Image: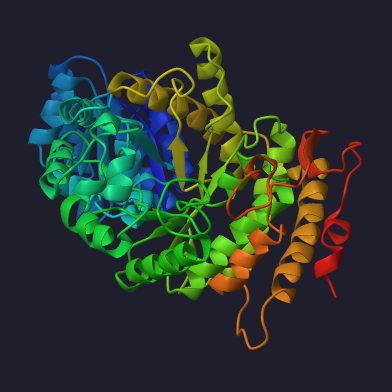
Amino acid sequence: MQKTVIACALGECVHVAGVTNFLRLAEQAGWRTIFLGPAVPIDTVISAAEKEKADLIGVSYRLTPETGARLLGEFAEAADDLHSKGIRFAFGGTPPIAEIARRMDFFEQVFEGGEPTDQVLAYLNGFTQPVSTLESYPQSLMERIKWKSPRPVLRHHFGLPTMQQTIEGIKQIADSGLLDVISLGIDQDAQENFYHPDRQDPRRRGAGGVPVRSEDDYRSLYSASRRGNFPLMRTYSGTDDFLRLAEMYVQTINNAWCAIPLFWFNKMDGRGPWDLEGSIREHQQVMRWYGERSIPVELNEPHHWGMRGAPDVVSVVAAYLAAYNARAFGVKDYIPQLMFNSPAGLSDAMDLAKMLAILRLVEPLHSRHFRIWKQTRTGLLSYPLDLDAARAHLATSVYVQMALKPDIIHVVGQSEAHHAATAADVIESCKLANRAIQNALDGAPDLTADPRIRSRADALIQEAKITLHAIQNIADIGVHDPLTDPATLAKAVTLGILDAPQLQNNPFARGNIVTRIINGTCAATNLSGDLIPERQRLAAFIK
């Protein structure tokens, strides 16, 4: 049942900017809102609360503390009967009057201006603890999402070439209160050779991220985040010793969720020692391990195809296979990663259509045992080198992403094309993203209603079904479920059903497919540039 909040400026006070902003956020949080106006007498507030059956009454006063103290005392006395009936009261004013309101022990929450939007929304969503301690900030992803709703949780990649740089940066980021999830960027040796010091190369130390070399290193990084808004922390699954790493991540950094691909992080992309089929089996077991512990799992799968120039339909199919396998192997909370701008030449409209096609395909998998939490991000390879242009790209990309109503936005810093993000870059990128998010929440047009976007999504879904049918047809006799069978999935790559132009000279993939950007889409073509629909491209595998 929808709750009702009424709010106004009390007595002779006419300053209502804070009141209207509070009501705007309440509306976003799902409340029925009633604005009584400026300079409202006490008896009018009481009458309105009774008439509207208010659940929450918000009052503001921003004049002198002496008159404010008297007025608030009179208000508390007049509203005592409502207070005893369980109606909640909140106050907003200048810091001196806010302090008076706190001492009265009448108001459930007191705001003095300048509080982060997240804090106000958290209160409206039912989180009433003072926002200053660990207990104030949910430490699981699902609770954090609910706490921030309707704003998405913000995640950002962070890892610098030394431990000390990274620790100091994490402290700065946490103190800013802007980022909800620090996604640890660890160097390649840590991902592949953490438990194999003999395989580590000192010359690669810090290449691509922070050089964690012990469990205590992870504990130190996590400890640095225990301040500010106490952000969650997570990291990638690694490329070898998967289950051993999974257990260590949970113990040392309370890994907020697992991120793992289905087809990648092996010899196919040069990031791990496993062959294709073997790595698929290992990744499936990692999903099962996290699922058994009710820890969310993200499959960062489809964009790996898109960044290598695969046609849109292959990315859509890869996204479906990822979700399908996550459900099959017991994941309870699933996070599809929807990377926009991959490949970089896609138009915003056709990019959005691709994401809608993915969500519509995976939506039937949703159940009370398999919950889907949408995560969007800007394309890694789409940022311009010029930092001013990159800032504009970040903001506009996030604004488009908001059309999908994401639960998580993986913010990709504006420095991506220029240098690894520093703490200052992370903080700036979160500010840019927050402005775009707020603009969208204030009333963005429904971009998904565009007939061209809907038509393209429909077409991609039909094409994807053909590709999935082809994969099912190549399974060996007796295979129970081709879409989860590692041998069949590996064969889909080696036979070229799943392919991308940049996979030439690959030990597993073919790299024979030709693609072009046509009218904002990435499509399979022949050498002359003529479109090749999936039924034609995959004719040899369709019965």
Task: Name the residue rendered at 45%, 39% in the picture.
Answer: 410
Left/right placement of residue 376 relative to residue 528 reads: left
Residue 9 position within the rendered picture, expressed as x and y whole percent measured from the top left: 34, 26
Is residue 209 at least partly visible in the picture?
yes
Task: Name the residue rendered at 22%, 20% in the picture.
Answer: 94
Q: Is residue 294 above or below residue 124?
A: below
Q: Is residue 32 above or below residue 491?
A: above
Left/right placement of residue 292 relative to residue 336 reads: left
Left/right placement of residue 533 relative to residue 289 reads: right
Residue closest to the far bottom: 478
Give the image's coloring scheme: rainbow
Is residue 106 at least partly visible in the picture?
no
Task: Name the residue rendered at 15%, 37% in the picture.
Answer: 132
Task: Name the residue rendered at 19%, 14% in the picture.
Answer: 64
Q: Is residue 526 above or below residue 205?
A: below
Q: Quadrant of the C terminus?
A: bottom right
Q: Quadrant of residue 41?
A: top left
Residue closest to the far left: 103
Residue 200 position within the rendered picture, expressed as x and y whole percent measured from the top left: 25, 42
Residue 267 position within the rendered picture, expressed as x and y whole percent measured from the top left: 48, 52
Q: In the depicted view, which residue is nearer to us: 288 or 482?
A: 482
Q: In the depicted view, which residue is nearer to us: 36 or 364?
A: 364
Residue 282 position within the rendered picture, expressed as x and y whole percent measured from the top left: 41, 66
Q: In the depicted view, which residue is nearer to us: 78 or 462?
A: 462
Q: Quadrant of residue 318?
A: bottom right
Q: In the depicted view, which residue is nearer to us: 424 or 88?
A: 424
Q: Quadrant of residue 142?
A: bottom left
